[in-house]
Image (cartoon, rainbow, N blue to C red):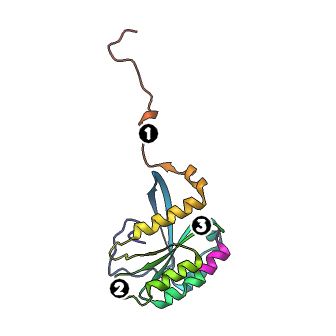
Amino acid sequence: MLNFVGKSFRPTHINTIGIDKEQRDFEYEGKIVPVVVWDTAGQEKYRGALPKQLFKRIHGVLLVYDINNHSTFNSVSSWMELIKADAPEDTAIVLVANKIDLEHRVNENEGRDLAKLYRIPFIMTSAKQGLNIEEAFRELMKLVLTKNPAILSTLKSSTIDLDDTPRNNKNCCSRG
């Protein structure tokens, strides 16, 4: 999450305790998309701390597990149950295998098979190496906006339209 919100990866970073919330404006297809990220660090004890009202308002979820820790992979199904129970039906979900720079205790095919079972995209990332972080969010953005195209009309353009500035067609020396 730190990489995505513009902070650098720190090997000595202390894992999230509780729930962390960060926000960043993300440019997608010429529009500025405000993205709010809630990070529970995958800890089951904080799963119930997320208010049901929060789930009612979400558009997308990056469901991340640690490829070096099988228990985080095993908890994906319980997180999916929570999302299916409390989030809107059209919530976009991307399964993310993180820490691919470490030993793989969860086989890549296990992740791909689980994503196929849930009919969701799968992407492998390394926060440490900055690998595929933006791509994971871009994939999620694409799904969110495909499922909820009306959101696009509420977003600001990331470019400035100079043609909207009023013009004075008279030059300084004309007689008029």
Q: In the image, residue 39 lies at what x, y percent?
A: 49, 75
Q: Is residue 160 visible?
A: yes
C-alpha distance separating marks 2 and 1: 46 Å
> Of label 2 and label 3, which has the lower sequence position?
3
Graded by Cα atoms within 10 Å as few (under 14), some (14 to 19) or many (20 or more), the crowding at tag 1 reads: few
**Quadrant position of residue 67:** bottom left
Placement of the N terminus among the 4 image quadrants? bottom left
Helix, strand or loop for disc 2: loop
Sequence-wise first label, 1 or 3 = 3
The 10 Å Cα crowd at callout 3, few under 14, some 14 to 19, many 20 or more, is some
Which mark lies nearer to you, 2 or 3? 2
Locate the C terminus and report the quarter of the image it occupies: top left
**Residue 149 in picture, x, y percent from top left:** 59, 55
**SS of the residue under disc 1:** loop
Determine which of the numbered discs, if any, sits on residue 44 in the image.
none
Residue found 50% across the figure and 90% down from its top? 71
Residue to which mark 2 is pinned: 102
What's the amino acid at mark 1?
A: Asp
Depth check: give the residue in front, 32 or 117: 117
Q: What residue type is labelled 2?
A: Leu
Q: Are marks 1 and 3 in contact (CB under 8 Å)?
A: no
Q: Name the residue under label 3.
A: 58
Q: What stretch is highlighted in magenta?
A: 80-88
Residue, x 39% and y 88% (percent of image)?
104
Q: Residue at x 46, y 64 (%)?
A: 138
Q: Residue 134 versus residue 4: which sits nearer the camera?
A: 134
Residue 174 included in the magenta stretch of the image: no
Q: Disc 1 designates what residue?
A: 161
Whether residue 49 is visible to the viewer of this picture, yes or no, is: no
Q: Is residue 67 above or below residue 139?
A: below
Disc 3 residue type (three-letter): Ile
